[in-house]
Amino acid sequence: MNDDVLTRPRTRTKPKTERPKLHKVILLNDDFTPREFVVTVLKAEFKMSEDQAHRVMITAHRRGVCVVAVFTRDVAETKAQRATEAGKAKGYPLMFTTEPEE
């Protein structure tokens, strides 16, 4: 028997790749921002069709809030911030926020 060769069992460690936690972007209704402007922002920032954007805007209008889309945290926060700033730039209180998806 050859004692020079030391055999060790090979242990493979699988890296646990957790999927990043997803965050919802939420549109908050207000009574001042024009509906058409909200639709324009949804189309521009969230790449929605006219129809999708209109449905999201109406849902927020009726229920007070509407989930716009779900992204990784960084993307969700960036999009919410940019959409909110688009409203501010026009003097509207348009507000988008984010929260972790359950």
Image (spheres, rainbow, N blue to C red):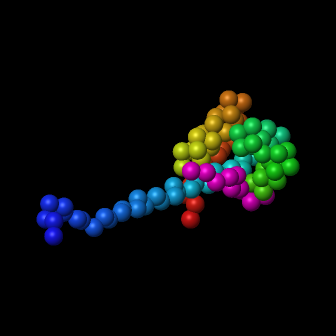
Seen from this angle, which residue lies furthest right? Answer: 51
Give the side of residue 94 with respect to residue 43, left or right.
left
Q: Is residue 78 above or below residue 68?
A: above
Q: Which quadrant is home to the N terminus?
A: bottom left
What residue is drawn where x is 67% and y is 39%? 83
Give the side of residue 57 with respect to residue 87, left or right.
right
Q: Which quadrant is home to the C terminus?
A: bottom right
What residue is drawn where x is 72% and y is 47%? 30
Give the side of residue 86 with respect to residue 59, left or right.
left
Where, by quadrant of the figure, is residue 92 drawn? top right
The percent coordinates of residue 43 (x first, y second) are 77, 41
What residue is drawn where x is 51% and y is 55%? 20
Seen from this angle, which residue lies furthest left? Answer: 3
Residue 93, can we see it? no
Q: Nearer the viewer, residue 90 or 10?
A: 10
Residue 40, can we see it? yes
Seen from this angle, which residue lies furthest top? Answer: 89
Task: Report the magenta stretch's main SS.
Answer: strand
Magenta-drawn stretch contains 2: no
Write down the region rendered in magenta.
Answer: 61-72
Q: Is residue 17 above or below residue 79?
A: below
Q: Nearer the viewer, residue 18 or 52?
A: 18
Q: Nearer the viewer, residue 13 or 3?
A: 3
What residue is drawn where x is 63% and y is 41%? 79
Magenta-drawn stretch contains 68: yes
Q: How many marks?
A: 0
The percent coordinates of residue 37 (x first, y second) are 79, 38
The percent coordinates of residue 47 (x first, y second) are 75, 42
